[in-house]
Structure formats: structure tokens, C-alpha cells
Amino acid sequence: MLKNLVGVTGAAALLVGVCLPLPSSATGSSATTAESVQPAPSVASDAGNKPDVIASREKLHLNPTFDAGHVPFSIRINGIDTSWTTMSAFVMPNQTLELSASGGAGAFSAEAATGTLAATGAATWKWTAPAQSGSQQIRVRNADGSKTAVVEVFVLTPYDGNGSVGSYKIGEYKAEAKDGNPAYNRPVGFVEVTAQNIDTRLSPHFRLGQFLCKGSDQFPKYVALQTALLVKLENLMEALADRGLPAETLHVMSGYRTPAYNAGIGNETTYSRHTYGDAADVFLDRDGDGKMDDLDHDGASTKEDARILYQLVEDTLDPKLPGEFAGGLAIYSPTPSHGPFVHIDTRGKRARW
């Protein structure tokens, strides 16, 4: 398994990661939450007294077509390392990204169709985003050109906080960040989503359209999204595959929510991480029936199936990913309107409810 190497440089740094080993137990820490005022349930401790459902039953045969999506070298983007074939960055117009490549034999090459890409040394480059919003690709190839890593850079449409972008209603963000935490600063820009780019691949197993806010059929739509969330979800995909549950993707039941939509569905959490682009409500749906798979084989899609995803995040991702990837984690039971699911976010602080 590839090494885990993640770093962070600067407020606008791109956060990336690689697949993680599977530890045998969770590590505890204090719990806080900005999504709910309810105390955190004892999910981890309760589950720790039960046998590991996946480990104790006969594992499914791994799908031989599952591909974690790595290249045999590392790309550093503004001080952050990744070995994924595709990873997305989100930058403002005219913002600069610094890139470098390492880990392969011979020279590397890089190219970008738009923006300004300039070599600054051996296998190092500086890319300046164009002034126009849109999606741009930076491609880095190894010496013989056989492997390519793609940085999918989304140049954001600036947002001035007035409640809308064009005719697309956003709603109002709080003027001040919660407790002075910059993670709660309102977004400075949004990805413009059109009928033409809705299927753009963000990372090996996720596409742009999976994270759109519900409630509007108009184009263009606008979405806030953070690389840290993609990193965490990709690591979860790999953990699932390692435990005998490979999948093409996770079903993202809810990704970005505008403050207007969040209030409209009755959510009283004014600082919901969904409105900041680093939260997703997800479930595993390998058979495509629109609900959580029956992972514990009890004949039904229940909260216990969602608990398996919860434990993979608790036991595997959180102990190994750096603190910048820490965040909220919660299980939600099925209701008449939806099946069970797990909430995941990367607010930078551990929270359980």
C-alpha cells in the first residue's frame, strides 16, 4: 500500500492524500460539534464491544476492476503531495499554484492549455490562473510519458456576499466566522456548474454533479467545494475496497447546500458545514437501488449498515489523516423520506453526534 504523506502550506493550500492502512482499533479524543447541540452518542464505544461485522464474515471477492487511481510518482501542489491520477484544486482568478514532481526515474514534464505555466527549476513549475472563471487542467507526465497526473483546477466565480451569483440564489452567510475560526469564513467564490461540465471528474471516484445543491433545475448552478472533503471520501473508498467492499463511488445524498436551501429545509444550524463545501451525507449503494446496501446481511437497510461506514472513518481515516482533515461524523437512521446514511465533514476539529 502506498505511503500516507500529507502536508499543508498556507490558507489556500490544496489538501491531498493517498490510501491508508487499516488499524485494528479506534483512538479516542474529545468530541465537539457545530452541527448539533445534542451530546455525542457512544457509537464508537458501543461498536467496540461488538464483533467487526466485515472482518468476522466471509469477505466478498475484490472486484478486479477496482482502481484506487494512483500514479507511481508524487505531485506536490503548493507544498501538498498526492499520487492520485486526478485531484481538484479550487482557486480564485489570477491565483498562483506551485507544483513539483518527484519519485520517478528521469525528467518530468508539465503542460497547461490555459493560464501561465512557467518552469522554476528541475521538475518544478508555477502556474498562474487566468482571469476568467472555469475549469482548467494541468497535466504532469513521467519521463517516458506513460503515466499522467491531472490537477483539475477550478477557477472560481467571485462572490461578494450579496446573496446571489447572477440569478442563482445563495442566501446569507453569517458576517463573522464562528468563534473566529477561518473555516467558517463565507466562501469567496463558487464553482460555476453547467450542463457541459457537470460530469467533470474531481478525483478518481467522484464527479462535480454529485455535490450540487438540490432545489433548482436552472443552469448555471454554483457550488462550494473543498479538496479536503474529496481526499477524505477517496480514502474511504480505498478503505471500503480493502475491507472487501469495492465500489465505483459513494452515493452523495447531500453535498453543498446554499444557506437559503439549508434554511428552507428547516435546518436551524446556521454554520452547517454543508454550506461551506466540506461536508457530505453519503451511503454505499453498489447495487444502485438508491439506498444503503445491506452490509451486515440482516435482510434490511438499517442504521447498523451505516454504522459500518462510520467505523471505517473512525477507526481508519481519523487516526491516520492529519488534523486538518478532522471533522464531523454522525450516523442518521432511516426515515420515511430517506434511508440510513453517514455525515462526514472536514471542519478541522473532531465532532461527533
Image (cartoon, helix red, strand yellow):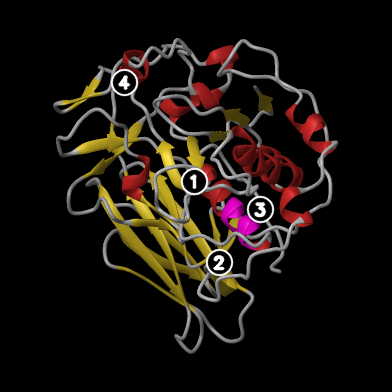
Q: Quadrant of the C terminus?
A: top right
Q: Tell me, yes or no, whether the two marked residues, 1 and 4, touch with CB atoms within 8 Å.
A: no
Earlier sequence position, callout 1 versus callout 3: 3
Q: Is residue 79 visible?
A: no
Labels 1, 4: front one: 4
| Label 3 residue SS | loop
Q: Residue at x 67, y 25 (%)?
A: 352
> Label 3: how many residues lie within 10 Å, few (<14), some (14-19) or many (20+)?
some
Displayed quadrant of residue 82: bottom right
Residue 130: % across, % down: 27, 52
Q: CA distance from mark 1 to mark 2?
A: 17 Å
Find disc 3 in the rendering and name its residue: 6
Helix, strand or loop for the magenta stretch, by majority: helix
* Towards the viewer: 37 or 244: 244
The disc placed on residue 261 is 4
Which of the two residues, 132 or 153, is positioned nearer the viewer here? 153
Residue 89 visible here: yes
Q: Position of residue 134 (x, y in %)?
A: 25, 49
For residue 227, the mark is 1
Tell me the amino acid under the disc marked 1.
Thr
- The question of residue 239 being in magenta is answered with yes
What range is drawn magenta here?
Answer: 235-241
Residue 246 image point, x, y percent:
56, 62
Q: Is residue 92 left or right of residue 305?
A: left
| Amino acid, disc 2 | Ala
Q: Earlier in the sequence, mark 4 or mark 2?
A: 2
How would you rate the neighbour count of disc 2 (Cα within 10 Å): few for under 14, some for 14-19, many for 20 or more? some
Kindly identify the residue that appears in the image at 57 percent across and 86 percent down.
106
Q: CA distance from mark 1 to mark 4?
A: 22 Å
- 203 relative to 193 in the view: left or right: right
- Tell me the kind of residue under disc 3: Val
**Residue position marked by numbered label 2 in the rendering:** 68
